[in-house]
Amino acid sequence: MLHHMRIHLKIGMIIAILGLISLIIGSIGVLGLKSLSNETIAVNKAGNTIRTGSRANQSLLAINEALYHLAAAPFDAKETSPQLSQSMDQFQSRLSQIETDTDGKYTDRIKEIQQDFGHFRQTAETSATMASDLSATTTPDSLTPDQIKLLASVKEATALQKKIKPKITALGDSLVADNEAIITQATQMAEDLTLWMVLIAVGGLVVGIVGGWVIARVGMVKPMARIVQDLEQLANANLDIEIYGTDHRDEIGLIAKAAQTLRDNARQAEIFRAEQAHDQEQRLKRNTMIVNLTDQFDSQASQTIDTVANAAIQLHKSASDLSGSAEQSSQQATMVAKAATQASSNVQTVASAAEELTASISEISNQVTQSTEVLREAVSQAAHTSDIVRTMQQSSQQIGEVVTMIAGIAEQTNLLALNGGCPARC
């Protein structure tokens, strides 16, 4: 896959990987901060609920203080009764606020407290009414029976309040425990978020480094090193290598295709130089062979011409000797003719011999002429072609045959002469 991507795309891939890792880290950070924000809101809400619970306790203490003030000083009922009523309203309001803030988690406990507080309020309001009734007739220094009844009512309200106090305290402790749990959860979440962000950051850094290294190594550095190695081989005239990366679609593929073209052109040039060297070698061999054949032909032609010349000289000599023999034969024929006149019984024989001798002399003359023409033609054509040389060889053979024939005729002539001379001598 990396082989089919351009270098700028590979670099973009590395940047994209790092960007994706940064996006993941940022997303986790945002989600974590949102969760921490929610936990912070929950912590604040729990803190507000605790404060509301504390204020409810304060309201309960204010109610208790107002009751004791009514019992001790009924003549101040006009000031104390409104404070008592306000404190009781605040207490109930804060209970309702606690129920709302806790999302109904403590509804049952709050209802139980409100129910107890309802009884307590009735008693407290009765005590406040009794105090208001006694405010006009009571003095700080006197204790009337009605005031004693008021003290008893206050004690009854206080007893009811003591039942509410532990429940309010337990509710407050629960709210504190919830707040601590929320704080612990928020702290743990913050620690987990920090750990995850660190792990993801380190992992993303490792992935980015490894991914970048792999992309750079496999997609750029290694193919570049291979193509450089192939180019060095081409520079060293090693044309038998296979160029790496010709199937790639990136810049390495373009360089590889250019290197392949250089290799193919170098191979063609090498083949062309080899063909030229071979042709030059063949021309040198052919020229050497022509020179050798020419020298051989000159040598053979010279030998043939010398042989033919010697044969011609020998033929001329033989012709001269034959002419002498012919003259001698003519003289002998004359003598034979004279002898024939003297010996009539042998006239016909001598005449026949004379005719044969005359025919032999004519044949010899014709053969000599033909041999001379053949010799002249053989000598004139021997310098031109090897075919003429072969013709000359054939002609030489014919001349040899003619010489042999002449020699045979001469022998026959001598025999005839001898045959003709024998009767004359007889």
Image (spheres, grey):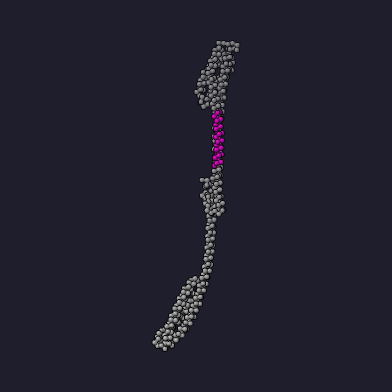
- Residue at the front extreme of this rendering: 426
186 and 285: which one is in front? 285
- Residue at 47%, 79% (x, y): give it: 368
Extent of the magenta region: 183-211
Residue 212: image location, x then y, percent: 55, 42
186 and 201: which one is in front? 201
Is residue 95 visible in the rendered image? The answer is no
**On screen, residue 159 above or below 372:** above
Q: Is residue 355 magenta?
A: no
Is residue 303 visible in the rendered image? The answer is yes
- Residue at 52%, 53% (x, y): give it: 240
**On screen, residue 329 above or below 187:** below
Q: Main secondary structure of the magenta part?
A: helix
In which image quadrant can residue 422 be found?
bottom left
Residue 253: image location, x then y, percent: 53, 50
Q: Is residue 390 left or right of residue 86?
A: left
In which image quadrant can residue 28 be found?
top right
Q: Is residue 203 magenta?
A: yes
- Residue at 50%, 23% (x, y): give it: 108
